[in-house]
Image (tube, coloured by chain):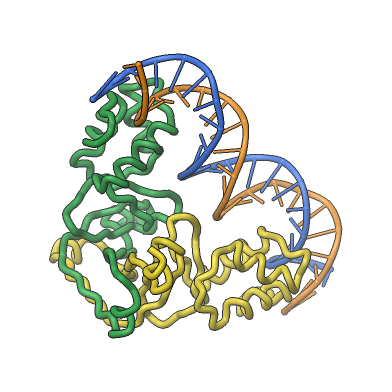
Chain colours: A green, B yellow, C orange, D blue
Amino acid sequence: MGCKLTPQRIAILQYLDGNKEHPSAEDIYKAVRRKFPTMSFATVYSTLAVLKEKKIILELTLDPDKKRYDPELEDHNHMICISCKRIIDIFGEHSLTLSKSERRNFSVLNSHVEVRGLCPECRKTT
Amino acid sequence: MGCKLTPQRIAILQYLDGNKEHPSAEDIYKAVRRKFPTMSFATVYSTLAVLKEKKIILELTLDPDKKRYDPELEDHNHMICISCKRIIDIFGEHSLTLSKSERRNFSVLNSHVEVRGLCPECRKTT
DNA sequence: TTACTTGCAAAAGATTTGCAAACGA
DNA sequence: TCGTTTGCAAATCTTTTGCAAGTAA
């Protein structure tokens, strides 16, 4: 993988693999600490930094409170529930029309749609 | 305006009016403190909370480091330079196709496109 | 072996809160 | 006047960093 596969990193990778929850660093810390009681936040953050750099996971910024992480690599977008902060993947198409000067001036790496709203559960409650 | 128009709030509003910089709370604090040397962070944050709630400004979450604020109320999207963190408005059209079940389950309040890339200045340098 | 990684604690940075004094309506 | 707002400091929360000890390759 281009970096040392320590047991801690393997545990984090296993927790993230196929995970649709878009967990925060703390969620990951709490979950993985069950296997590794000595696991520290520093290790979680440094592992996330490595995985992010190697493009094995995405760091999401749509939750205003904290960063969330996503192991889904297929191109997709997200919905966030403004009430419970649950994040849901969206795989539909999306398009954005950029003006000529925008396309000329800004070199685009990627684009991402954030949909804000209420999830089914919170819609019932409110 | 439905809340007390204190000189501090007026100064913050004036600083934000027509501002295309997408300033952070600290940017606003530094700028407005020139007029009000006693201005505190607490006042900036509480004013921003009021303006946000009254939908007079938008709180942007696309800068991973801190929240940024935008007085532009017309529907638009944003580009962020991953190098210098400059945020630029985009007024083009955008569309996102949601599946039937997505539309049925999630009540959408708004959607927003974040484009990541390099701004003209940073593209030259890199 | 050895450079990379871990774990702890402390630090940093952004944001929030408690509360008494000040003030706009 | 009176309820809201300010300003200060302290607190909170997330994330980062320094460093000695441990470990994968």
Seen in the image, is A97 located left or right of residue C11? Answer: left
**B68 vs C25: above or below:** above
| Closer to us: A84 or A38 | A38
Give above or below for A4 relative to A108: above
Q: Residue at x 33, y 57 (%)?
A: A81
Can residue A50 be seen? yes
Q: Could you tell me which quadrant the N terminus of chain B lies in?
A: bottom right
Closest to the observer: A76 or D5? A76
Toward the left, the furthest residue is B100
> Can the viewer see residue B107 in this picture?
no
Left/right placement of residue B37 relative to residue C9 reads: right
Residue A24 lies left or right of residue B13; in this view the side is left
What residue is rendered at 32% in x and 84% in y?
A101
Quadrant in which residue B40 is drawn = bottom right
Q: Quadrant of residue A27?
A: top left
Query: Which residue is located at x 16 percent, y 65 percent?
Result: A92
Please name whichever residue, B28 or A124, is drawn nearer the observer in this view of the structure: B28
User: Which of B122/B95 is in front?
Assistant: B122
Give the percent coordinates (x, y) of residue B9. Answer: 67, 73
Residue A75: x and y in percent read 18, 58
Quadrant assignment, res A120: bottom left
Q: How many marks are shown on the rendered structure?
A: 0
Judge left or right: residue B79 versus residue D11. Answer: left
Q: Position of residue A5 (x, y in %)?
A: 26, 28
Q: Is residue B97 above or below residue B91?
A: above
Location of residue C10 in the rendering, given as x and y in whole percent from the top left corner: 62, 31
Position of the C terminus of chain B, as image quadrant, is: bottom left
Q: Residue at x 33, y 50 (%)?
A: A59
Kindly give the residue lying farthest to the bottom in the view shown: A100
